[in-house]
Image (spheres, rainbow, N blue to C red):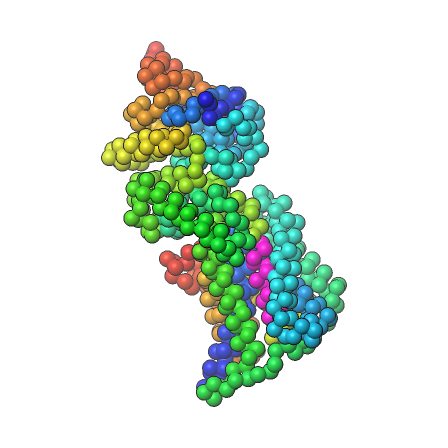
Amino acid sequence: MAHFVEQIIFGLTVGSVYALIALGYTMVYGVMKLINFAHGELFALGAFVGYIFLVTLNWGGLLGPALAIGCVAIIVCVATALAGHALERVAYRPLRHSDRLAAVVSALGASIFLQNVIMVVWGAQYRAFNASLLPTIVWRVAGQSVPLIRVFVFLTAVVTMAGLYLFINRTRFGLAIRAAAIDQGAAKLMGVDVRKVIAVVFLIGPALGGLAGLLVGIYYGQINFNMGQMYGLKAFTAAVIGGIGNIGGAMIGGLLLGLLETLGDAYISGAWKDALAFVALILILVFRPTGILPERVAEKL
Amino acid sequence: MLILSLSSVTKTFGGLVAVAGVSLGVERGQIAGLIGPNGAGKTTIFNLITGSIRPDDGHIFFSGRSLAGLKPHSVVALGVARTFQTIRLFPRLTVLDNVLSGCHCRLVSGVVAALLRLPSQRLEEKLVLKRAMAELEFVGLAERWSAEAGSLSYGDQRRLEIARALATEPKLLILDEPAGGMNERETANLMDLVGQIRDRDITIMLIEHDMGFVMRVCHRVFVMENGSLIAEGAPLEIQTNPRVIEAYLGRQDD
């Protein structure tokens, strides 16, 4: 059990990235009852936009790591938010009043399209995200090693999520989002501009996904055009574990999934990592389709 | 002065003519009742006014402005609010949050201000909170503000729907069967409440099956049958109108 705490920290790091992506799935589902299958690609896009500035343009060397990461994070969020917005306009808004299946097919199509756009632009091979921005500091805490980069990824994700949580639960616009998630018709008749709510959800969700992409790039040091597929599926699993449509659930689901994966990896076998995650998805869908949170806490979005 | 007027409004659903060329006008400051047998087209009229559905023909004017092509949230912003025949609160939100959702359309600060928590936006939130509590006070639910809306009694849920509608600062309040499912005491309280709302210079239009309620509360009553307006007038005139009696009780000549 020597490395148990290290595994926990690793699990939380990975999990916080899953949680960040899962929020995009769950927010869109909450308001539109639609799984945005292209969300994983927006995540990948975030990584590649970060790549442009941190690697191709070498902002890290020009501005210094802290300023570079801060600026690039904002650029990535804005870029993926705009891409998400465009996606909504082109792929989902025209289908607002058609069958739900039509929107699902459109989402799958958008996913394949975006993935191929990324491949055409940046190529199919892995790209080294060798930004080496953060100094490789490793703290020793009670015999366990705590790398700075893990703490950085975890804290960035957690602070972002806390901000989102406050926005949803403490502001009037957040209330409008929650109201629209419960009953769009009634929300409209109480003066809520549901189209605007959907537009904002499609800005925030992709921005969080894009930020997660940037974090993954910095953390793992390599990115690939189809990285969105596996991360997207994992984050979707996290959203379902927490109860799809439930913001707090997505956060908890992401962290739990990260822990499950890394502990499984460490104590069972690395080969079983992905299988464990999807077995969890199946078990949840079969036995507790509303997610692990108790019913009363499981307030949908 | 007419606050609301419909001129030959028609709406069909497939082959069914739900509303057939209805023209009516509601005076500002009045309590107007819309009655008629089930399926007469009363709720369709309400849905047309609030912009949930669009008329196939005819025009609807509110405060002299055409409502043609306006989305529901824009109609609310102009000053039309409604409650529903079957309660449509946000059951998992608190009582206060439900009312606050009604305040949404009066907020000036946008999403960006909310994200940055600008001082102007914080002040606005404070004022809105005060107004929402005042509306809860008005309908007598102030001390239940933190309860989940779904946990309230039926009568209280109806009152909460009214508070939520009032929070949009309407000039015209549309109530769809407000006394539906209420007991006698609750109905009596509702009558008081409707009177107090009108005293705030809010015009009221309501659908109600409780004839005692309609006759006592309304200044003017409109009667519909099969999508058409068959009578309008003061409650007393309506009660003695032979066409109305026929619509409700059937022909008496067999």
**Is A119 on the left or on the right of B96, as rendered?**
right
Residue in view at x 26 percent, y 32 percent: B188
Residue in view at x 67 percent, y 72 percent: A63
Q: Pick whichever, B218 or A275, lies toward us.
A: B218
Give the x, y percent position of residue B24: 47, 21
Q: Pick whichever, A203 or B46, lies toward us.
A: A203
Determine whether A151 is above or below B74 in the image. Answer: below
Give the x, y percent position of residue A117: 72, 60
Query: Within the image, what quadrant is residue B222 found in?
Result: top left
**Is B33 on the left or on the right of A105, as rendered?**
left
Give the x, y percent position of residue B210: 31, 28
Q: Quadrant of the N terminus of chain A?
A: bottom left
Determine whether B74 is above or below B25 in the image. Answer: below
Q: How many marks?
A: 0
Give the x, y percent position of residue A73: 61, 66
Give the residues in magenta. A201-215
Residue in view at x 64 percent, y 67 percent: A72
**Is A5 on the left or on the right of A147, as rendered?**
left
Q: Is residue A104 magenta?
A: no
Q: Main secondary structure of the magenta part?
A: helix
